[in-house]
Image (tube, helix red, strand yellow):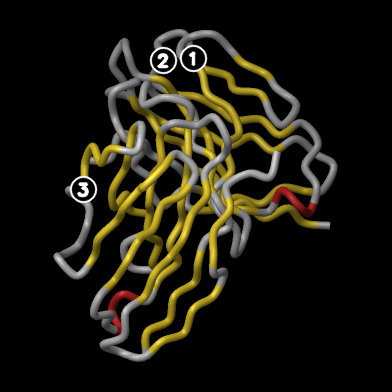
Amino acid sequence: DAKTTQPTSMDCAEGRAANLPCNHSTISGNEYVYWYRQIHSQGPQYIIHGLKNNETNEMASLIITEDRKSSTLILPHATLRDTAVYYCIVKDYGQNFVFGPGTRLSVLP
Amino acid sequence: DAGVIQSPRHEVTEMGQEVTLRCKPISGHNSLFWYRQTMMRGLELLIYFNNNVPIDDSGMPEDRFSAKMPNASFSTLKIQPSEPRDSAVYFCASSLGLAGGPHYFGPGTRLTVL
């Protein structure tokens, strides 16, 4: 059974914030939420990860709900180069990454 | 930092031939992972090493596949003999430790077996 549920695809206007949701209702206390993206024909790229608190780095922000059953990846000002498949992965430190189908984000001019 | 380096970037071969894919992890990283990506199955973990030792090869599809890591800066994934169903993009990734740090992926090798 998949640990996460993501929409198959989303569109976002260039320059606007892209908010990508992820449901992980069965997440356990030791499991982190990771986000990766894969731009066409490239290797997956690590974006951000978190456990309980919201996180921010130079690429994105990660908002995790208080009950940790869902999260949102925010790209504050999407550009055309952010068009990619975005993967939300839940795992604890001893587990391997399992990549699902992800969300295909299209940033439109 | 050069990132994870993979070679070749593209490989076209004929069924039955031996194929060797190469990977140089990020300097200082002590865990290395081989993944395969296809349209049908998505991104799958094949095998991973920690401190040059294979830890879990349960994802290796069959005996035709083998992987080695002779030192901390080099790994190979070999397919012998290759089959058309092995056509895929093969990614190598490295991380600092096994304890869940992010994986940093290479650009991949696109393998086509005719």
- Between residue B85 and residue A106, name the one nearer to us: B85
Tag 3: residue type? Asp
Q: Residue at x 40, y 34 (%)?
A: B31
The Cα atoms of the two marked residues, 2 and 3, are separated by 32 Å
Q: Are callouts 3 and 1 both on one chain?
A: no
- Contact, mark 1 vs mark 2 (Cβ under 8 Å): yes
Q: Residue at x 41, y 24 (%)?
A: B97
Residue A56 lies in quadrant? top right
Task: Indicate the secondary structure of the residue bearing disc 1.
Answer: loop
Residue A102: x, y in percent?
Answer: 46, 48
Return the residue at label 2.
A68
Look at discs 2 and 3 and give the one toward the viewer: 3
Q: Report the disc number at residue B57.
A: 3
Return the residue at label 1.
A65
Q: In this view, does B96 lie to the left or right of A73?
A: left
In which quadrant will I find the C terminus of chain A?
bottom right
Residue B114: x, y in percent?
Answer: 37, 91
Tag 1: residue type? Thr
Tag 2: residue type? Arg
Task: Indicate the secondary structure of the residue bearing disc 3.
Answer: loop
- Contact, mark 3 vs mark 1 (Cβ under 8 Å): no
The Cα atoms of the two marked residues, 1 and 2, are separated by 5 Å
Please state the chain letter of the residue tagged with numbered disc 3 in the rendered image: B
Q: In this view, does B100 lie to the left or right of B11?
A: left
- Between residue A90 and residue B31, name the one nearer to us: B31
Q: Residue at x 21, y 41 (%)?
A: B56
